Amino acid sequence: MAAVYDRLMADTPYDQWLDWVERHWAKGEKPVRVIDLGCGTGTIAIPLAKRGYRVTGVDLSTEMLAIAYDKMRQEQVDVAWVEQDMRELSLPEADAVISLCDSLSYLTEEADVQETFKRVFAHLAPGGSFLFDVHSPYKMLHIFGDETFTHVEDEVSYIWQCYCDPLRLEVEHQLTFFIRQPNGLYERMEEEHWQRAYQPVQLMRWLTDAGFTDIVITADYSDLPPHEASERLFFSARKPKSLT
């Protein structure tokens, strides 16, 4: 999906994620060193670098990172790109860690989420912040559900089929792409993705178990608490300045 990701995400409100992050950072000490977990093609990491942050983008996909590197060169900024599994995070210490665009929703086992939270905590400087968003249980059940979505344009089209396991709050995404080639013919490509939602109280407990404090949940890019039909949950947490 890396080859068509940016084209398909062209209308995604990345500015709202950036605004949410910087609103939270403005409430405390502004970070210098930032780790972006699940950075994809760098659409968050690169603007942050342009705003003066020292950013390290982490992703599991070599293809995504290659596109991010090309975009960085075009923007004439510096970002350190690292191919790494967030569950095995091993990097120098940072002042802030972010994981946006529901990247953490790809962790479909509870133990993987808990391990990632522990890794993030270990990589934060005292007083550092952890900001992330995930799909809500409501979105898994009522927006994705067992729905089929389609998109048609000249260069790329897709059929996106969702299959929901309501007990696990897990959705299997089956994606079929039709990508126009230079000769005018279309190449068919298929991918499968799995995402899982967790109850907010679970995520708060795992954050607390990892050592985080000052945990706040908001919804849908706002500073307001979630409600029953919120689709995207935003979490902010902090590593205490003193662990004693």
Image (cartoon, helix red, strand yellow):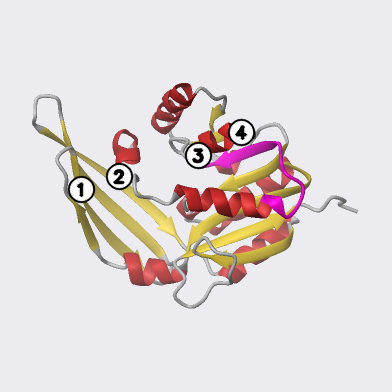
Question: Disc 2 designates what residue?
Answer: 8
The range drawn in magenta is 25-39
Q: Quadrant of the N terminus?
A: top left
Q: In this view, does 109 lie to the left or right of 24?
A: left
The residue depicted at 31 percent of the width and 48 percent of the height is: 192
Mark 2 or mark 3, earlier in chain: 2
Mark 4 near mark 3, Cβ–Cβ under 8 Å? no
Q: Give the Cα separation between the discs numbered 3 and 1.
A: 23 Å
Mark 2 near mark 1, Cβ–Cβ under 8 Å? yes
Q: What residue type is labelled 2?
A: Leu
- What SS does tag 2 mark? helix
Task: Please state which of the two labelled residues, at mark 2 or mark 3, is closer to the viewer.
Answer: 2
Task: Please state which of the two labelled residues, at mark 4 or mark 1, is closer to the viewer.
Answer: 4
Q: Can residue 117 be seen in this view?
A: no
Mark 4 or mark 3, earlier in chain: 3
Q: What residue type is labelled 1?
A: Tyr
- What SS does tag 3 mark? loop
In the displayed structure, 121 sits above or below 64; it is below
- Name the residue at the right extreme: 244
Q: Is residue 189 magenta?
A: no
Image mark for residue 55: 4
In the displayed structure, 156 sits above or below 185; it is below
- What SS does tag 4 mark? strand
Task: Please state which of the two labelled residues, at mark 4 or mark 3, is closer to the viewer.
Answer: 4
Location of residue 97 in the rendering, given as x and y in whole percent from the top left corner: 64, 44
Location of residue 91 in the rendering, given as x and y in whole percent from the top left corner: 66, 32
Image mark for residue 59: none
